[in-house]
Image (cartoon, rainbow, N blue to C red):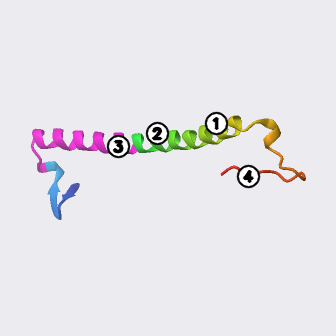
Amino acid sequence: MPSINIDGTNYDLDNMSQAAKGQLASLQFVERELQRLGSEAAVYQTAKVAYIKALKEALVPPDMLTAPGGDTLRLG
């Protein structure tokens, strides 16, 4: 007998009304979408970091990338 636990109470899925099953399906859909969007947001955050790094590098004139004496400057 499959069941779902909500706030510490188990509910038998076989005995749920069609309305309750519809609400459960909607809840499961929303949970999947939130997970998908979270993963998508992580991809965008990674891209943002890469774009910021590339922008910083593009803003530094090429002759400023090497400090006097041959040391490399670190951007940070």
The residue carrying pointer 2 sits among few (fewer than 14), some (14 to 19) or many (20 or more) residues within 10 Å by Cα, namely few
Alpha-carbon neighbours of circle 3 within 10 Å: few (<14), some, or many (≥20)? few
Q: Which residues are magenta?
A: 15-35
Which badge, 2 or 3, is on the more N-terminal residue?
A: 3
Q: Nearer the viewer, residue 55 or 36?
A: 55
Tell me which amino acid carries mark 1: Leu
Alpha carbon distance from label 3 to label 4:
38 Å
Which residue is label 2 attached to? 40
Residue under circle 4? 74
Secondary element at image label 1: helix
* Cα distance in 3D space between marks 3 and 1: 31 Å
Please tell me which residue is depicted at 20% across the width and 44% down the height of the picture: 24
Look at 49% across and 45% down and name the residue there: 42
Label 3 amino acid? Leu
Q: Amino acid at mark 2?
A: Glu
The residue carrying mark 1 is 55
Horizontal placement of 21 versus 50: left or right? Answer: left
Q: Quadrant of the N terminus?
A: bottom left
The first of marks 1 and 2 along the sequence is 2
| Residue designated by label 3 | 34
Q: Residue at x 55, y 40 (%)?
A: 48
Q: Position of residue 31 (x, y in %)?
A: 31, 45
Q: Is residue 21 magenta?
A: yes
Q: Is residue 7 magenta?
A: no
Mark 2, secondary structure of its residue: helix
What residue lies at 79% left-to-right and 42% top-to-bottom?
Answer: 64
Secondary structure character of the magenta stretch overall: helix
Q: In this image, 28 relative to 41: left or right?
A: left
**Element type at mark 4:** loop
Amino acid type, mark 4: Arg
> Could you say where residue 71 lies in the image, as x and y percent from the top left?
85, 53
Quadrant of res 23: top left
